[in-house]
Image (cartoon, rainbow, N blue to C red):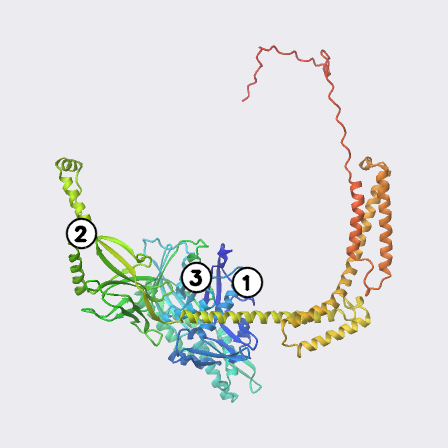
Amino acid sequence: MAAMSVIGIDFGNESCYIAVAKAGGIETIANDYSLRGTPSCVAFSPKNRILGVAAKNQMVTNMKNTVFGFKRLLGRKFSDPHVQKELKHFPFKVEQREDGGIGIRVNYLGEDNVFSPEQITAMLFTKLKDIAATALQTQINDCVISVPSYYTNAERMALLDAAGIAGLNVLRLMNETTATALTYGIYKQDLPAPEEKPRNVVFVDFGYSSLQVAACAFNKGKLRVLATATDPYCGGRDIDMALAEYFCQDFLTRFKLDPKKNQRAFLRLLQEVEKIKKQMSANSTRLPLNIECFMEERDVSGEMQRATMEQLCSETFTRVERTLRAILHNAKLRPEDIYAVEVVGGSTRIPAVKSLIEQVFGKNASTTLNQDESVARGAALQCAMLSPAVRVREFSVADVQPYAVRLAWDAARGEDGDMEVFPAFHAAPFSKMLTFYRKEPFSVSAYYSDQVPYPDNFIGQWNIRDVQPTAEGESQKVKLKVRVTIHGIVTVASASLVEKKQDSSQTDNVDMENVNEKESNQEAPMDTNGASQEQQNGPDNQEVREDDMKGEPQEKQSWTQRVGQWFSGEGNDDKKDKSKDKSKKVLVKTIELPIDARTHGFSLQDVNTYMEQEGKMQAQDRQEKERADARNALEEYVYELRGKLSAGEALHDFVAEDQRRRLVSHLDALEQWLYDEGEDQNRQVYSDKLSELRTEGEPIKQRRLEFELRPGALDDFALSIQLTNKAVDQFKAGDAKYAHLSDADIQKVLEASKNALSWVESARQALAHTPRHQPPPHTTHQIRQERQSFESIVNPILNKPKPKEKTPPPASAAPGDAQPDGQQQAPPQAPNQPHEQMDVE
């Protein structure tokens, strides 16, 4: 079952999808409503939380406590201009927290509560985790979660915090376009060989709230992302808003109704225009829009056709075209270099978007991928690759860091104090080693060089502590590893101090070593060198010997020269030189330095606090579910029992009339209680009332069940007696089957059969005269016991095996007797006479 818990989560702004890696391939999991997509909605009620499909279903009636669109708030501050723009679309209350973050105020358990977007996301992840655990019948821990490729450090760390609060171990945050490319490439059998020219494919992901385009190069067993182009604020919802704005003006003109003044009406309008938008993707004719009881108990109607929609959304389509052309520039590709253009995301179904793709790339949009589930499938494949529990086909994935990253520090002598560590579209994950020469603790800061969809270019600041000068007062050599992690997060992974000490066998080389360090300190204060993601620093306090003097490579000598040197003694001089070189050693000691980081995201203490709070809310949800289940069980039993007690129904004849009237009256009172003061009671109250009701209802059901089963039990008993009497008749007729039985045995069988038949007849008469509403004198269980007792007497006798006949001993033939059929006995062969042999081929 361990392999079954390898899942990928496509966390979308509107819907989420879960895929799982199984032995037969990748499968998308359906939720408790048998839907593959789970809405990204979280709602709150006075009793519990409502998550997923149920939350979206009650959005219109509970809109102030139904939170949606929170993916676009992750990792941001309340003062963020993007957040202020998003707040216009939210009917729920959003406020600023003490730390400047975003707080979503809702009414939960009858009290006002403020949750962060990360907490709301963790609640949704909890629901997705439960869906996967229910479908797979195993605990879910490891997962891969998809993120938009334009996410910055702050947003990625916020998503990791949310997953941690939900108890998920994220193996990787994977870019959505990269996950789509993995889904496309891993099953392709016709990809070019590794040494051949790669196949370039463009992936267009036009979703509900953003547009992402990626250019990828494929070889057999290899995927490399070349570049990306994104528009974080262009999506299908912009088309919805344009259509809603059009109908608002239309309704204001024709019906004198302004939906913008009524949040509930505007929310219903958005839901209806989304439906008509989907219909226009398949129909170019004029389509109607009708909403009943829209505002002021009035019905409204309108109509639209595809040409009008394309005209209203021309600005959105212009932004789409700009992003499509940007990918050609970023990836340095021409349209003829592209093999195919694959589209995913719900908004790519719009005909105008497909026309733009054909116009820019000169190729028709390919729809070989599942437009809704391909991202989740790619995430599940990546999770299977990273998990040791599953074996997957070898396929390497090389992603990119979409933004240029620069590093700044306190400049020392001759230093610039600023450099670009990772250019835009640099390979990721990746590490680079930076060498500093410092006498005291110092700090480095990372920033985005380019414009990013985040108000602050700051990534983080790292303070390297415990840096001290050498005993001679010189600078120490400090190595920093700057890394783009597998999650796409830029960080300073480690800092190490490199100390050099001379070996005890030589002292005259120390000054030279110090001089070299002084010279390097003045001329090259910082060195950089790149390293792949597998390169690691040495362990703490590891000592490495380095040769100060490395000789030139020796020329290869012939065997004759080596023998001549050996006889002439020249080889001894070489050995002396080598031993002298070996004595010139320096001990290099690497010490890991502590780092204080100031980056985005929650502290460990905050995450633990939120995890504890999430655990309490899960316990409250379980308690409410158990309470609701107990109430539903009582309500179901009341309706079922009362219906069966009605005239002509199954249980009507099995209860006395006065008892039936009293019981029906009691059931009516219970129904009234359930919808009155019993609407909100503890689980134990419902369980007690159900147990009390069962003490009256179950005996009635049992009498009905007995009435149905008794005739069959009596018939089986009578058949057993009949077969026994038949066997006795066969014995009397001299049947060889029973010839070995004695008369005493048969007499015993006859006696048992007579008694059993008498019991059956008396039982039939007693049951026939007993009213149905009274307990029967003989139950089905008693009848079966009597039958077993009867068969335990007669069966051993009738099934007694016949005694075995004694085999007579063989008669010994006298010497000289003639053999049958006139054959003579062969004379015995002489002892020395050889036997004749038969040749067998």
Gap between marks 1 and 2 measured at Cα: 70 Å
User: Pointer 1: what residue?
Assistant: 134
Q: Are marks 1 and 2 in contact (CB under 8 Å)?
A: no
Q: State the quadrant of the C terminus.
A: top right
Q: Is residue 538 above or below residue 810?
A: below
Check disc 3 and report its element: helix, strand or loop. helix
Gap between marks 1 and 3 measured at Cα: 22 Å
Q: What number of labels is visible? A: 3
Q: Are marks 1 and 3 in contact (CB under 8 Å)?
A: no
User: Pointer 2: what residue?
Assistant: 506
Q: Is residue 92 shown left or right of residue 834?
A: left
Position of residue 270 measured from the top left corner of the image (x, y, whole percent) = 49, 79
The amino acid beneath tag 3 is Gly
Q: Single out the residue that lies furthest toward the bottom.
A: 256
Mark toward the viewer: 2 or 3: 2
Position of residue 385 measured from the top left corner of the image (x, y, whole percent) = 42, 57
How busy is the neighbourhood of tag 1: few (under 14 within 10 Å), some, or many (20 plus)? Answer: some
The amino acid beneath tag 2 is Gln
Position of residue 336 measured from the top left corner of the image (x, y, whole percent) = 33, 63
Position of residue 646 measured from the top left corner of the image (x, y, whole percent) = 77, 71
User: Pointer 3: what residue?
Assistant: 378
Closer to the chain start, of discs 1 and 2, is 1
To which quarter of the image does residue 446 belong?
Answer: bottom left
Residue drawn 44% across the image and 53% down it: 391
Q: Is residue 34 shown left or right of residue 603?
A: right
Q: Is residue 534 above or below residue 330?
A: above
To which quarter of the image does residue 510 belong?
Answer: bottom left
Is residue 424 something one can see in this rendering?
Answer: yes
